[in-house]
Amino acid sequence: MSSFDLLHPALQHHIVNSLGWRELRPFQEAVIPQILAGKHLIVLAPTAGGKTEAAFFPVVSRMLTEEWNGLSVLYICPIKALLNNLDVRLEGYCRLLGRRSALWHGDVKPSARKKILREPPDCLLTTPESLEVMLDSPNVDAQRLFGNLQVVIIDEIHAFAGDDRGWHLLSVLERISRIAGRELQRLGLSATVGNPETLVDWLAGSCKGPRDVFLPLASGSDAADVQLDYVGSLSNAAVVISRLHRGEKRLVFVDSRARAEQLAAELRRLEITTFVTHSSLSQEQRKQAEEAFASRDDCAIVATSVLELGIDVGNLDRVIQIDSPPTVSSFLQRMGRTGRRAGTLRNCLFLATKEEMLIQAAALIDLWSTGYVEPVQPPSLPYHILAQQLMALILQESGIGQRDWFSWLSGVSGFQSISPSQVDQLVSSMLERGILWEDSGILGMGQSGEETYGRRNFMELFSVFLSPPLFSVLYGRQELGYVDEMTFLSKQEGPRILLLGGRAWQVNHIDWQRRKAYVEPTESKGRTRWQGSGQGLNFQMAQSMKQILSTDLNRDYLSQRATQYLTDIREEYAWLDPASSIAIQTGGQEVEWWTYAGSQVNATLARQLSQQTRHDVQFDSFTLTFHQTLKLQDIEVAIKAVCQRDPNEMYPSIEEQAIDGLKFSECLPRELAIEMLEHRLQDSESTQKLFQQPVRFVIQQ
């Protein structure tokens, strides 16, 4: 008996006869028994590998077998475009079985929402923010809508878990579970997670039911064709793209909207049918480009990360990456768009336009080839999300008991790490500031809370998590690209230097609330072309770059041209040691400690060493630079002293203005806000790994 035979007979019939499928994919078959058993599960499988059906078919089989009625399944996605893409598919599956699905997000018309409330569907496709609106709206009977709920499917779960939006999602699920009066089966889908066992515990939280991880089955389809070439400029990249793979459908990823438009213009000049999609285009423009691309064969679409998630643009022949994506996870999402047809391989061609990007791309490919994928780390101490949830519960319940409210959220692991005294401190702060009021033990919205968050029916409370944690970098009106907010959290004395688009920029002003950084050109300071690299790198990426620079091994994935450039760059770094870090005193007497430890580790060390030497220490992802009056011997003493400390007790200095960029910062005592940011920028595990490496001290003439 196969797992397929465990599905409801009506579903089996329609899979074979209506859909015309001869069989399910092996991993889809293998996951059926676990979902039918009601397990909380993380399901990992390659992009476009059929994860949606792997989860939905056994869930809808349970719906039929157990005769669920009303809204019994939530299907949650991080972006509306993905929901729109899935809506037609899931609605078709439900219709075959005499069931209904519906779509609810910010762009859905009020008439469609009213119909959902009047006649709840069996399956609802939505976002966490829309669920929050439903819970808190006086026009929604939450008990009637969610009272029959059984299962929650969360697509692209890694897109939630790595930031505060994940804590918001889990909070909403805890509240809905309490309304439904039962533990909801939680299923998370992803193509790229480095720590799925940790993630399933994060997802299941305080649920009592069994939990597990389903990993991809071993198969010959794991092979991939990955190549790296050095082209030197965006216009040269366009020429290469125009000459390679003619007659094929190519998806080209770039790092900013401005470069996407520039590359698209170059390709059109070279008579390549080209479409472009990024977040500045209207929804209709993006939809037209994606639909046109999906129906064409000989063409290219140039995209930013908006096409990284699983939106279907048809069968792709090639993925081309300009420079390097920020993470291995991101690379896997992009490459996973290819190799879907029988007899084809997943593939990705990297075209580096700058030498620093050649090194970073090679480092990323090396990490990927070892099987490394970044672990998803939910951010620490989400005090501000707890404040938001308290206000949301007040709206949901029309006031809530001061002693009772936390019980709604106590199953969320991020809140379990917050002590009762800190919870009391948070509530007291909100009462003192007039954000809340209290009467006979009942909490309600205060005048300040109404004024701050009450506009447009409290939409300020619901829409805050939609923006990714990125800053736009602007030179005048020209957008140069994006950097992660972590780039600016750590405090630095003196000018802050970024490197974007292959040149150095000095940050003149940071608008924390609008998430914009204003820069002007500057001459890059330091030994490396990419010192101050725009988006802070993690420890693993920085260490991999050191290995690329300090070893003579050439890689099969490198073109002849890339190999030659890499050989020339390595000559400049002949002093690097793959097994140790190096503190060098140059002819100008300045000492640089080349840790290659990443921005978070170096931010932490900069604070410790500044205190130890009583002089400011500058840092980036690769180096720590000491005050030029300090001698190498004194710095050696300071470094050795710091390396003896417990990394768990070490935190970076925080840019206090960063608090203004926190959503709901008005609710937080300043000491809690600083503590939260310090913990979020800390990377004690990587700091310990650096401490295990010997340090060489060198005077360079």
Image (cartoon, rainbow, N blue to C red):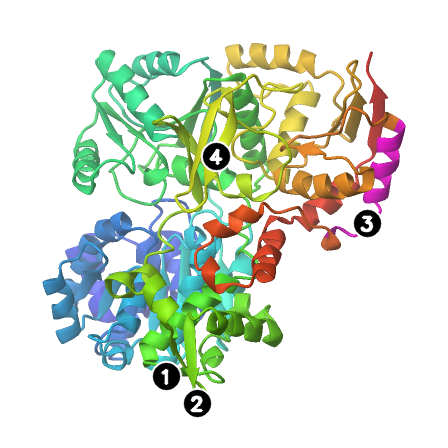
Q: Position of residue 639 (x, y in %)?
A: 82, 37
Along the line of sight, which residue is nearer the eye, 602 or 278?
Answer: 602
For the point 45% across and 52% down, the residue is 158
- Helix, strand or loop for the magenta stretch, by majority: helix
How far apart, in angstroms, are the residues tagged by discs 2 and 1?
Answer: 28 Å
For the point 58% across and 28% down, the residue is 532
How far apart, in angstroms, are the residues tagged by discs 3 and 2?
Answer: 49 Å
Residue 35, by quadrant, is bottom left
| Residue with the mark numbered 1 | 181
Q: Position of residue 157 (x, y in %)?
A: 42, 55
Say what amino acid the circle numbered 2 marks: Ser
Label 2 packing within 10 angstroms: few (<14), some (14-19), many (20+)? few
How far apart, in angstroms, are the residues tagged by discs 3 and 4?
Answer: 35 Å
In-image side of 292 versus 495 (left or right): left
Quadrant containing the C terminus is top right
Quadrant containing the N terminus is bottom left
| SS category of the residue bearing label 4 | strand
Which is nearer the N-term, disc 1 or disc 4?
1
Say what amino acid the circle numbered 4 marks: His
Span of residues in magenta? 633-647
Along the line of sight, which residue is nearer the eye, 118 or 516?
Answer: 516
Asked whether disc 3 touches disc 2, contact meaning CB atoms under 8 Å apart, the reply is: no
Q: Nearer the viewer, mark 3 or mark 2?
A: 2
| Residue with the mark numbered 2 | 440
Q: Nearer the viewer, mark 2 or mark 1?
A: 2
Q: Is residue 635 magenta?
A: yes
| Residue with the mark numbered 3 | 645
